[in-house]
Amino acid sequence: MPVPYRILTLGLCLALTACVFPRKDFSSVPDPSVIQVTRTGSVYQAVPPECRTLQQPSQLNKADDLRMSIAFGCATYTNLAEQVANPQDLVTPKAYRGQSADTAEAAVTRYRNNEVTPLRETTSTDAGAD
């Protein structure tokens, strides 16, 4: 097969692959603003979203193929709201002061001189075991 036909065949295969695997549509996923931050006195608290408000019908519903509705992003944003160490940072984030040039240079020097500290031989499942 001559080279131009191979290129044409490859291009056609790639074009057909794009039809078989379409890009996912994330437009229905809410943005992080669904996490509310409340303040009681000087204490801030991140409040996860109410999942019923995020409930959306499945995009795969058909008259003969009933599927349950999905609350896109509910678990993600609930977990994020529960893990925020200081919810005030969501309201008034601190400015990034940048990396210290001295510590960055020291890290590069250690790497170049092969003086890096090796990782410990533990995993997250046995780190607390005696």
Image: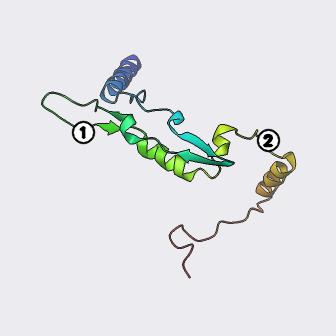
Instruction: Residue at 22% x, 30% y: name it.
Output: 61
Q: In the rendered image, which residue does mark 1 sit on?
A: 68
Query: Between residues 107 and 40, which one lies in front from this camera angle?
Result: 40
Taking 37 as reference, is 67 left or right? Answer: left
Query: Between residues 128 and 5, which one lies in front from this camera angle?
Result: 128
Q: In the rendered image, which residue does mark 2 sit on?
A: 98
Q: Residue furthest front?
A: 41
Dividing the picture into quadrants, the one containing residue 95 is top right
The spot of residue 32 in percent (x, y) is 53, 36
Taking 79 as reference, is 99 left or right? Answer: right
Q: Residue furthest right?
A: 102
Q: Residues within 10 Å of mark 2 (few under 14, many from 20)?
A: few
The spot of residue 8 in percent (x, y) is 37, 18
User: Along the polypeptide, which appears first: circle 1 or circle 2?
Assistant: 1
Taking 6 as reference, is 86 left or right? Answer: right
Dividing the picture into quadrants, the one containing residue 93 is top right
Which quadrant, please, contains the C terminus? Answer: bottom right
Q: Residue furthest bottom?
A: 130
The amino acid type of the residue labelled 1 equals: Met
Q: Residues within 10 Å of mark 1 (few under 14, many from 20)?
A: few
Instruction: Residue at 84% x, 54% y: name it.
Output: 106
Query: Between residues 28 and 103, which one lies in front from this camera angle?
Result: 28
Q: CA distance from mark 1 to mark 2?
A: 47 Å
Question: Residue 130, which numbered label?
Answer: none
The amino acid type of the residue labelled 2 equals: Gly
Instruction: Residue at 50% x, 36% y: name it.
Output: 34
